[in-house]
Amino acid sequence: MIAHASAQGSSRNIALIAHDHRKPDLVEWAQFNRETLSKHELFATGTTGQILSDELELPVNRYLSGALGGDQQVGAAIAEGRIDLVIFFSDPLAAHAHDVDVKALLRIAVLYDVPIACNRASADFMLSSPLMVSAYARHPQMPQETPTVDQEPKRSSGVVA
């Protein structure tokens, strides 16, 4: 099993994502937590990243819009060990054409043991956790690899000795 270690010291790579109707909530939360966020490397999808960069006057690394592959880019960064925490203010009352991508992102975060906050309360708890400024080894939930044809066990001929 591969155990990814989160960034040493006080700096983390934080992905910030918000659906359209939740962008104002994320911006408000981020403004309240600006000082803390300024100590970390920030990543965001599409428009959310531009809004956060403008409002916080902090550098924000931008992925594509979520609907155009940004959620998948964040998922890939998680799998590669480049994201330590995801703050994702989703809109649970609206249907999204890219719901399957959102579900895949949540699945990858769980699989790779990356904390993901889906509302303000969980984001507050995670950002204020003492674990944000100390080393933390994640424990991915990797499934057992299935054997290839060359590794399959030998089958008996059916003859019992």
Image (spheres, grey):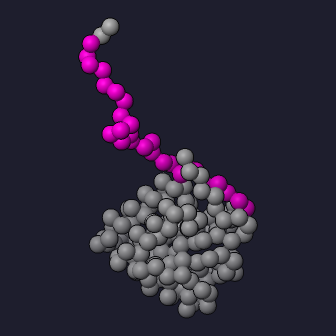
Residue 41 seen in render:
yes
Q: Which part of the image, by quadrant, shows the C terminus?
A: top left
In the depicted view, which residue is nearer to us: 138 or 21? 138
Please provide the residue range marked out in magenta.
134-159
User: Is residue 129 placed above or below 44 in the rendered structure?
Assistant: above
Q: Is residue 121 left or right of residue 103?
A: right
Q: Residue at the spot x=59%, y=65% of the render?
A: 84
111 is within the stretch colored magenta:
no
Q: Is residue 22 visible from the viewing direction of this image?
A: no
Q: Residue at x 30, y 10 (%)?
A: 160
Quarter of the image for residue 28 reads bottom right
Residue at 40% over, 80% down = 65
* Residue 115, quarter of the rendered image: bottom right
Residue 32 image-quadrant placement: bottom right
Which percent across, then down, holds residue 104? 39, 61
Residue 17 picture location, percent across and down: 48, 75
- From the viewer's side, name the closer residue of 97 and 73: 73
Residue farthest along the front direction in this orientation? 150
> Magenta includes 139?
yes
Relative depth, front residue between 148 and 109? 148
In the rendered image of this protein, does residue 138 appear above or below residue 99?
above
**Residue 154, image x, y percentages:** 34, 27
Q: Where 31 falls versus 2 (above or below)?
A: below
Majority secondary structure in the magenta region: loop
Q: Please state the horizontal and vertical placement of residue 157, each as a whole percent of the image.
A: 26, 19
